[in-house]
Amino acid sequence: MNSTTDKYHRHPKLRIQEQHGTHAYRAYRAIPDDFPVHFLLGTPVVLITTENEDGTSNIAPMSSAWWLGNRCMLGLGAISQTTINLIRTKQCVLNLASDNMAGAVNALARTTGSKEMITASEGTGYLYFKRMNGYKYVPDKFGHSGLTPADSDLIRPPRIAECPAQMEAELKGVNEMMQDAEMKGFIALEVKVLRTHVHENIRMSGHANRIDPDKWHPLIMSFQELYGLGRKKTCESILAKISEEGYRPFSNPVDDEVTTEKEE
Ligand SMILES: Cc1cc2nc3c(=O)[nH]c(=O)nc-3n(C[C@H](O)[C@H](O)[C@H](O)COP(=O)(O)O)c2cc1C
């Protein structure tokens, strides 16, 4: 038995289950009270803008996001207004926050653009959790956060002017997570970045298309707390000896014409 399985077996709740004849494999499925419920180790805060059904804009802070080439995977609650909007319109902007934007992020935290949350009853999962945990229904997230909308080039949801990197993106894949479990409700959404806007002051000098990590300090969420990155590199990176341009073949071409419809 390795130390992880040993930990599960030592947990008092599980010992009680075993005394009452519960089969051992059930023990592996439970999360003991002395185990962390999540491992949100530190990922960038993304402010996702989407379009509501009535044509207004929604903003949601999120951080379960990672990129490969020009694709990004987003982990979102299925009932979030953002998820509903993104699945309906197939469009969003990924606006990356800097570590001096914590005020706006905190203003958006524990808000939702979902009106249904106000009357959510027990048994409605994450919606009820939000209601019980002090979330507020906020229809005008731009006004509420003081952030400034800027028109996108290719899609309808606006960019957030204050964010140093903004990616116009299109939905390409929807994967329901936790399909093997009773408790579902999270979706992994794959989006394709169609166009990226970058503030001049975070560009790497001498390069047409690189961001300088010494100049940009993204906001990071780690275990629900907000951090910045250290102002200095820890050490020289061996990986960084590979030219960034060498990865370009892994980005799929972006068509000039966006494939979702854009009304005039
Ligand atoms: C810093 C931060 C990070 C968050 N990360 C996520 C996340 O990765 N996935 C998620 O579903 N919700 C995340 N949330 C919670 C959402 O913001 C929350 O569900 C919100 O109500 C969504 O808004 P909407 O319903 O208007 O789309 C995060 C909140 C904050 C403040």
Image (tube, helix red, strand yellow):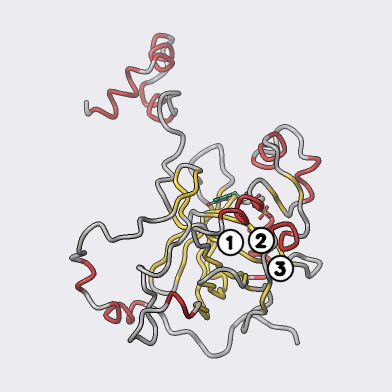
Q: Residue furthest top?
A: 19
The residue where tag 1 is placed is 47
Task: Please identify the quadrant where the C terminus is shown.
Answer: bottom right
How crowded is the residue under tag 3: few (<14 C-alpha within 10 Å), some, or many (20+)? many
Q: How far apart in space, not on screen, are marks 3 and 1 (Cα)?
A: 13 Å
* Dot label at residue 51: 3
Above or below, comparing residue 118 to residue 46 in the picture: above
The residue where tag 2 is placed is 59
Residue at figure coordinates x 55%, y 37% from the top left: 182
**Residue 260, position as x, y percentages in the image:** 63, 80
Three-letter amino acid code at disc 1? Leu
**Residue 77, position as x, y percentages in the image:** 60, 50
Above or below, comparing residue 196 to residue 188 in the picture: below
Is the residue at mark 2 in contact range of ligand 1, meaning its CB lies under 8 Å from it? yes
Which secondary structure lies at badge 3?
strand
How crowded is the residue under tag 1: few (<14 C-alpha within 10 Å), some, or many (20+)? many
State left or right for residue 215 relative to residue 49.
left
Three-letter amino acid code at disc 3? Glu
Is the residue at mark 1 in contact range of ligand 1, meaning its CB lies under 8 Å from it? no
**Reading the chain from its start, which is encountered first: label 3 or label 2?**
3
